Image: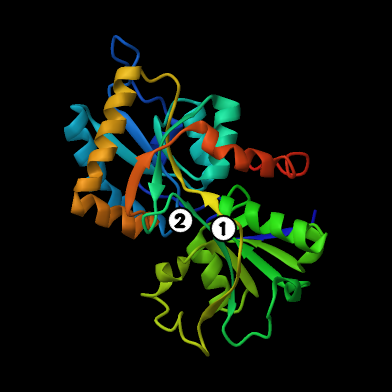
């Protein structure tokens, strides 16, 4: 496989408050086996320091609803989040679809809820290039430098790579000139804006995430344009470890669903993940991800 150029974030050098605790024992349990403190795990779709700050009110609200201490931790990548849940050091995870099916397979992690974006329970991946680039179709990207968030990213890697394989009959490794693992969706877009990559794949439309730092990101000459989109992808999950009691899981589900009526929490979810709501979910909805992953299972192991 072609050597990947890796950013600092993907190397795990990106640290945030609380991450060290994810590598330590979480302390005592209650009589029914539930933790005395509930730990929420988040993935960094944007700057981790920003996510850490923004999730604090959500953790506080959940703590009040559940009547127990709750804290949030932002992991360096999807894989770290899944493994923290597998070891029982994170109890509730905000996990994208691809990472979820791996977590379910390896650690019996269970989806209870999923996100809504623009009122929809699915979304697409986008191929994004410089507005002034000559690319007109995905086929034109052959030999280009491809920036993606994480090999375990559903919208950033799995579905775009599947489109390359299905439509062009080539592996992503052979098709692109170089692969740049950027660590986050924001960083993938910034790589193209700064000229370090030719194309980025992210969720639709992640450009809004970098508009404050790159005000011309939508400019028709100097910004980024959407070249193509993938098939629909089931939305991100809120998932729990199997060791939690049914009573606690039900309370967690009820509390998160109540956030649909809380404008302050909805604003946080919109800012951090572009979620505008939460709805119920079942494991079967993610079978399309399992079927897609079968094409990659012999070649990549995103959680290693």
Question: What residue appears at the point 49 percent right and 28 percent down from the top-left corner?
Answer: 109
The residue nearer to you, when weighing 123 against 69, is 123
Question: What residue appears at the point 60 percent right and 27 percent down from the top-left corner?
Answer: 106
Where is residue 31? Give x, y as percent.
Answer: 29, 9
Q: Which residue is mark 1?
A: 149
Where is residue 78? Give x, y as percent.
Answer: 53, 45
Q: Give left or right: position of 16 versus 299.
A: left
Calculate the distance from the C-alpha at mark 1 to the C-alpha at mark 2.
8 Å
Q: Give left or right: position of 94 versus 222.
A: left
Looking at the image, is 255 positioned above or below residue 129?
above
Q: Which residue is mark 2?
A: 45
Secondary element type, mark 2: loop
Q: Quadrant of the image for the C terminus?
A: top right
Residue sitting farthest toward the bottom? 221
Question: What residue appears at the point 59 percent right and 35 percent down from the top-left corner?
Answer: 102
Looking at the image, is 30 positioned above or below residue 193?
above
State the image quarter where residue 241 is shown. Answer: top left
Question: What residue appears at the point 33 percent right and 40 percent down from the top-left corner?
Answer: 72
**Is residue 304 at all visible to an observer of this figure?**
no
The residue nearer to you, when weighing 163 against 174, is 163
């Amino acid at each position: 496989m072609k050597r990947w150029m890796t950013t600092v974030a993907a190397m795990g050098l990106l640290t945030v408050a609380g991450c060290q605790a994810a590598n330590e024992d979480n302390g005592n349990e209650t009589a029914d086996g539930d933790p005395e403190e509930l730990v929420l795990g988040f993935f960094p779709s944007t700057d981790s320091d920003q996510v850490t700050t923004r999730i604090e009110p959500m953790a506080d609200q959940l703590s009040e609803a559940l009547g127990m201490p709750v804290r949030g931790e932002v992991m360096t990548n999807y894989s770290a989040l899944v493994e923290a849940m597998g070891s029982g050091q994170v109890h509730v995870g905000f996990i994208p679809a691809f990472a979820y099916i791996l977590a379910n397979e390896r650690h019996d992690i269970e989806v209870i809820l999923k996100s809504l974006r623009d009122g929809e329970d699915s979304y697409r991946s986008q191929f994004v290039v410089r507005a002034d680039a000559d690319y007109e179709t995905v086929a034109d990207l052959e030999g280009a430098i491809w920036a993606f968030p994480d090999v375990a990213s559903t919208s950033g890697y799995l579905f775009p790579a599947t489109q390359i394989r299905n439509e062009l009959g080539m592996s992503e490794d052979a098709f692109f000139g170089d692969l740049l693992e950027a660590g986050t969706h924001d960083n993938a877009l910034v790589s193209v804006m700064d000229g370090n990559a030719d194309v980025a794949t992210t969720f639709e439309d992640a450009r809004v995430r970098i508009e404050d730092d790159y005000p011309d990101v939508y400019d028709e000459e100097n910004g980024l344009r959407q070249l193509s989109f993938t098939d629909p992808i089931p939305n991100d999950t809120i998932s729990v470890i199997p060791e939690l009691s049914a009573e606690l899981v039900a309370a967690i589900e009820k509390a998160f669903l109540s956030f649909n009526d809380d404008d302050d929490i909805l604003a946080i979810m919109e800012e951090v993940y572009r979620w505008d709501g939460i709805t119920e979910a079942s494991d079967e909805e993610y079978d399309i991800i399992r079927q897609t992953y079968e094409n990659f299972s012999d070649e990549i192991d995103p959680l290693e």
